[in-house]
């Protein structure tokens, strides 16, 4: 085994192939399988709700690609599957199925969308074949195909991070269960794919599967293998039959668990701090903001990135002051510098995300025709460079990927009509924290810091993301409230707790469950002081209302999204100092393809 001090950085297939040369054969297949997770959402471009034939082809392609990726992942989790003839035949059959259905899809798409869908499907085919044949060359080709899509930067970034993980840990099964390296582009593309999937066809089984890949969700091996073991006779009946079979098998697996084990697992999930800008803890008799920071993958690398971000932020702020730039932009830079602190030890990486997103939105607005009239191209480039450096820095922290995935799952950006009420619920929670003697000033300040980014958001898209971060913080704050009161009801094994949990309906979302539990504690716990009862009731009302706003509403349909997201042809371009519109998309919004023609790309590959 060759160990390196610095993480490898790949930008070409040749560099990856050279690095892979002396590594175990299983590594290439696993890395390729993880890389295709970034291009899988691209197949949403094949959706067309106005064309039944095309929509059917899209759903068949989506189902087959999901299944192929699940087979590759299962092989990484259970090494024996790499060598079992039956499983290798299953992987080969999946790759052929993707290839066959993809050919039918290409011909009916416009050039730009066809190019992206073809490259994504080709990457999935090659990665699954690499699993079936344990072939490094196929793994390299899969990476090359994935890098021909718009997810190019995400693919190379993920590959470099995963390769470094393997070099440090040495065994690929540890990497197989890690969350994928999520980029803002991947998050945006996944939102599009999720919205394009119809309801009432059990697509939730695959939505849950993919979103578990974005988070560090520990699934049992039996559960993982269900997705990779769909019988061929079921596969031949189409995506509805596949989804229904997986759903039924998951229900059987859940039924086999003992009830006590399920209850304990549900309790742990209810009170466990989730990925969010702020984690909270109990300090004595108070809720406090946890002081620990997220660990980076490498301390030396993190220090170098941190120093670069500090320098660029300071230089940019000074330039903006000299240029008498928009006060809001200057205040964003000042807040970023404050959140960076004096050293790496001062970083709370979760709180850098709101500043990063504000900076990226500022760059998107000023890097427009109107914006370029306000400032020089050099200054705008410096703004984009600073945003890129911050993005590179926060990407070093595993917690960031999980926070982004959690924020994405809320789908607040797709529901603008609920955003003001979410902000109001946030203000109520902060007021409750301020009035309570059981909340430290650090916890109160953490909530106010997140809320401040909502209040200063430039436009609706940025505000939606900042609201997502606020909701994640409020949910963690509510979980800490439950822990604060638990010891006074006999802990999580006492009769009072069991009574409270028995009153929580089984089919409600996480936020609503938190709210009901908090209400239960405030009414059934006999020994709670009045100050704690008031705090629990206030928090319970807030998170239960958030649950109704966010979890009880179905995601908007693709047709609704399309009708609301397309800017009017007569709509004026946004001014840099005014609120941005859809004409200024966020950095993760899709751009028009700029690739060469398919025939040209194909011929260049044949020459290789």
Image (cartoon, rainbow, N blue to C red):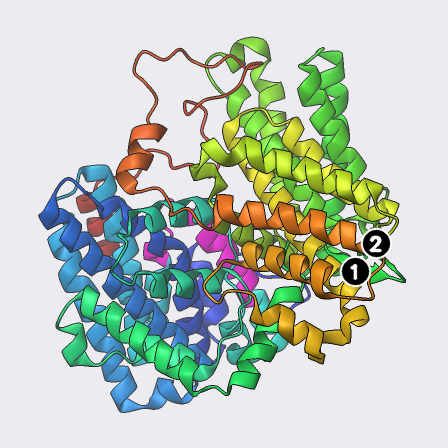
Q: Residue at x 80, y 71 (%)?
A: 487
Magenta residue check for 149: yes
142 relative to 442, above or below: below
Quarter holding the N terminus? bottom right
The answer to whether residue 504 of the structure is visible from this angle is yes
Front in this rendered view, residue 285 or 356: 285
Q: Residue at x 32, y 18 (%)?
A: 568
50 relative to 102, above or below: above
Q: Which residue is mark 2?
A: 530
Q: Quadrant of residue 425?
A: top right
Query: What is the secondary structure assignment of the residue under circle 1?
Result: strand
What is the total number of numbered labels drawn onto the structure image? 2
Residue 85: image location, x then y, percent? 27, 90
Q: Quadrant of residue 387?
A: top right
Magenta residues span 144-163
Looking at the image, residue 490 sits to the left or right of residue 543; the answer is right
Front in this rendered view, residue 280 or 83: 280
Majority secondary structure in the magenta region: helix
Residue 86: image location, x then y, percent? 25, 88
* Mark 2 or 1: the one toward you: 2
Magenta residue check for 396: no
Q: Residue at x 28, y 54 (%)?
A: 199
Label placed on residue 144: none
Q: Which residue is mark 1?
A: 281
Residue 482: image location, x then y, percent? 72, 62
Front in this rendered view, residue 494 or 122: 494
Residue 61: image location, x then y, percent? 21, 58
The answer to whether residue 356 of the structure is visible from this angle is no
Dot 1 surroundings within 10 Å: few (below 14), some, or many (20 or more)? many
Looking at the image, residue 220 sits to the left or right of residue 398; the answer is left
Front in this rendered view, residue 83 or 201: 201
Query: What is the secondary structure assignment of the residue under circle 2?
Result: helix
């Amino acid at each position: 085994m060759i160990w390196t001090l610095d993480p490898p950085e790949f930008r070409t297939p040749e560099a990856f192939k050279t690095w892979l040369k002396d590594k175990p054969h299983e590594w290439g297949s696993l890395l390729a399988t993880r890389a295709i997770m970034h291009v899988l959402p691209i197949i949403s471009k094949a959706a067309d709700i106005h064309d039944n034939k095309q929509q059917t082809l899209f759903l068949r392609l989506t189902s087959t690609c999901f299944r192929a990726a699940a087979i590759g992942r299962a092989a990484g989790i259970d090494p024996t599957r790499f060598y079992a003839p039956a499983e290798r035949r299953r992987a080969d059959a999946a790759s052929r199925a993707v290839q066959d259905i993809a050919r039918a899809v290409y011909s009916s798409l416009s050039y730009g969308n066809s190019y992206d869908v073809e490259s994504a499907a080709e990457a999935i085919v090659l990665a699954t074949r690499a699993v079936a044949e344990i072939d490094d060359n196929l793994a390299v080709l899969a990476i090359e195909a994935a890098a021909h899509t718009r997810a190019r930067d995400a693919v190379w970034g993920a590959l470099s991070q995963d390769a470094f993980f393997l070099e440090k840990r040495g065994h690929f099964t540890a990497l197989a269960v890690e969350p994928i390296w999520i980029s803002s582009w991947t998050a945006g593309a996944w939102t599009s794919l999720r919205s394009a999937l119809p309801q009432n066809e059990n697509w939730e089984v695959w939505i849950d599967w993919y979103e578990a890949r974005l988070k560090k969700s520990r699934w049992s091996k039996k559960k993982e293998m269900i997705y990779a073991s769909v019988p061929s006779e079921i596969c031949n009946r189409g995506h509805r039959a596949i989804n229904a079979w997986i759903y039924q098998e998951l229900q059987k697996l859940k039924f086999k668990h003992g009830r006590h084990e399920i209850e304990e697992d549900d309790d742990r999930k209810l009170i466990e701090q989730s990925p969010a800008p702020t984690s909270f803890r109990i300090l004595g008799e108070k809720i406090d903001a946890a002081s620990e920071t997220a660990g980076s993958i490498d301390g030396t690398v993190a220090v170098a990135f941190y120093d670069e971000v500090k320098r660029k932020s300071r230089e940019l702020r000074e330039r903006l002051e000299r240029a008498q730039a928009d006060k809001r932009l200057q205040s964003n830079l000042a807040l970023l510098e404050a959140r960076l602190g004096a050293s790496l030890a001062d970083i709370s990486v979760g709180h850098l995300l709101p500043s990063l997103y504000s900076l990226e939105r500022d760059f998107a607005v000023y890097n427009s025709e109107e914006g370029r009239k306000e400032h020089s191209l050099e200054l705008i480039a410096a703004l984009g460079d600073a945003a890129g450096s911050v993005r590179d820095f926060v990407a070093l922290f595993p917690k960031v990927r999980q926070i982004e995935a959690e924020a994405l799952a809320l789908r607040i950006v797709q529901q603008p009509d609920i955003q003001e009420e979410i902000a109001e619920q946030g203000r109520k929670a902060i007021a409750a924290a301020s009035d309570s003697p059981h909340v430290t000033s650090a916890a109160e300040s953490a909530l106010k810091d997140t809320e401040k980014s909502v209040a200063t958001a430039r436009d609706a898209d940025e505000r939606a993301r900042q609201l997502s971060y606020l909701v994640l913080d409020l949910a963690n704050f509510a979980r800490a409230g439950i822990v604060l009161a638990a010891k006074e009801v006999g802990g999580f094994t006492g009769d009072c707790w069991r009574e409270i949990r028995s009153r929580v309906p089984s089919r409600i979302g996480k936020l609503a469950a938190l709210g009901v539990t908090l209400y239960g504690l405030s009414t059934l716990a006999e020994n709670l002081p009045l100050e704690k009862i008031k705090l629990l009731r206030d928090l319970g009302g807030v998170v239960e209302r958030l649950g109704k706003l966010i979890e009880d509403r179905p995601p908007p349909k693709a047709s609704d999204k399309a009708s609301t997201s397309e800017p009017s042809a007569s709509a004026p371009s946004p001014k840099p100092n005014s609120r941005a519109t859809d004409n200024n998309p966020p950095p993760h919004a899709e751009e028009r393809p700029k690739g060469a023609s398919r025939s040209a790309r194909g011929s260049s590959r044949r020459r290789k």
